[in-house]
């Protein structure tokens, strides 16, 4: 799974010539995966 995500992000970096798009996508990916855990940790509401 992580290889596939890295491959896609590398493709975006290569096609755009910038690291901006992959960095934003990486942040969104982390938010989706870590968001529910952080929400639970601070509020106690199960995700």
Image (cartoon, rainbow, N blue to C red):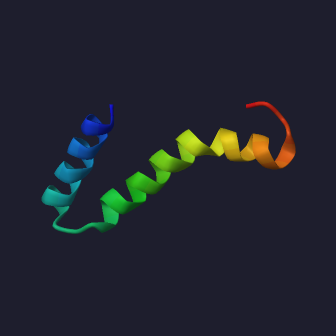
Q: Residue furthest right?
A: 44
Q: Quadrant of residue 40?
A: top right
Identify the image quadrant of the N terminus: top left
Using the image as rendered, state which of residue 37 and residue 25 is in the foreground. Answer: 37
Residue drawn where x is 55% and y is 42% of the image: 32
Depicted 20 relative to depicted 29: above or below: below
Residue drawn where x is 32% and y is 67% of the image: 20
Query: Residue 22 appears at what percent x and percent y?
Result: 31, 57
Q: Is 37 left, or right, of 15 in this rendering?
A: right
Using the image as rendered, state which of residue 34 and residue 15 is in the foreground. Answer: 34
Query: Residue 28 appears at what percent x and percent y?
Result: 48, 51
Q: Is 27 left, or right, of 40 in this rendering?
A: left
Q: How many marks?
A: 0
Residue drawn where x is 81% and y is 49% of the image: 42
Depicted 25 relative to depicted 7: above or below: below
Depicted 33 relative to depicted 15: above or below: above
Residue drawn where x is 17% and y is 49% of the image: 11
Q: Quadrant of residue 37?
A: top right
Identify the image quadrant of the C terminus: top right
Q: Is 9 left, or right, of 34 in this rendering?
A: left
Depicted 28 relative to depicted 47: above or below: below
Query: Residue 23 appears at what percent x and percent y?
Result: 37, 61
Query: Residue 7 appears at what percent x and percent y?
Result: 21, 43
């Amino acid at each position: 799974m992580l290889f596939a995500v890295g491959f896609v992000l590398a493709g975006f970096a290569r096609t755009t010539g910038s690291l901006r798009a992959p960095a934003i996508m990486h942040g969104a990916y982390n938010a989706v995966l870590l968001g529910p855990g952080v929400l639970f940790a601070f509020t106690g509401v199960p995700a």
